[in-house]
Image (tube, rainbow, N blue to C red):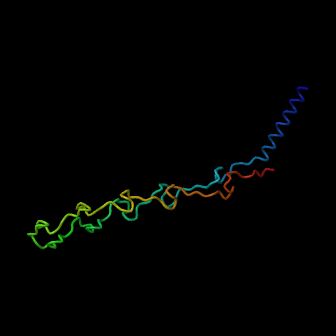
């Protein structure tokens, strides 16, 4: 009786395992079972950022007040009076906005030199639903 019970249990276990094996789905090989295909963003190369187009990554741009000269002509003597009391005879003033450097912080990227990638929304990758498994991550086992 013990032998027939063991045989019954073994047969049942094999039948159950075979049923599970036949009806079991397997992980989709195209998406590795995730349901999504993911590739590095071709625009930002996976960083999530692109160089600022205004400053080309330099973080600074030409001063819009003095046009990059770092100074502006004295509005009182127009740079022609060596005795002008306003400019002290120099004929110009240092630009207050750029402090005489001719450059200011880029107003587009706020001096960071880069802006977020609009193609991947700063993720660094592009992702879409797997066409092989329709986003389920599993494909039917065709070994019937």
Question: Which quadrant of the figure has residue 68?
Answer: bottom left
Against 18, residue 131 (above or below) is below
- Give me the residue at 88% from left, 29% from top: 5
- Give me the residue at 29% from left, 65% from top: 63
Q: Position of residue 30 (x, y in %)?
A: 65, 54
Against 128, residue 7 (above or below) is above
Q: Position of residue 87 (x, y in %)?
A: 14, 66
Residue 38 in the figure: left or right of residue 140: left
Residue 129 in the figure: left or right of residue 103: right
Q: Position of residue 79 (x, y in %)?
A: 15, 72
Q: Give the number of marks.
A: 0
Residue 110 in the figure: left or right of residue 27: left
Residue that protrudes farthest toward the left in the picture = 83
Residue that protrudes farthest toward the top in the picture = 2
- Give me the residue at 87% from left, 32% from top: 7
Q: Position of residue 61 (x, y in %)?
A: 32, 63
Give the quarter of the figure containing the N terminus.
Answer: top right
Residue 85 in the figure: left or right of residue 108: left
- Give me the residue at 28% from left, 62% from top: 103
Question: Which quadrant of the figure has residue 99?
Answer: bottom left
Q: Nearer the viewer, residue 113 or 29?
A: 113
Question: Which quadrant of the figure has residue 3?
Answer: top right
């Amino acid at each position: 009786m013990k032998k027939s019970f063991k045989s019954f249990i073994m047969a049942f276990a094999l039948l159950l395992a075979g049923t599970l094996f036949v009806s079991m789905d397997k992980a989709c090989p195209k998406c590795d079972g995730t349901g999504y295909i993911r590739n590095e963003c071709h625009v930002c190369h996976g960083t999530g950022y692109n160089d600022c187009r205004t400053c080309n990554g330099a973080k600074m741009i030409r001063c819009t007040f003095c046009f990059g000269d770092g100074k502006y002509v004295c509005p009182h003597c127009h740079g022609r009076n060596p005795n002008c009391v306003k400019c002290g005879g120099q004929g110009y003033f240092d630009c207050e906005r750029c402090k005489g450097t001719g450059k200011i912080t880029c107003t587009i990227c706020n001096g960071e030199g880069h802006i977020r990638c609009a193609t991947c929304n700063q993720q660094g990758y592009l992702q879409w639903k797997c066409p092989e498994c329709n986003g389920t991550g599993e494909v039917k086992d065709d070994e019937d």
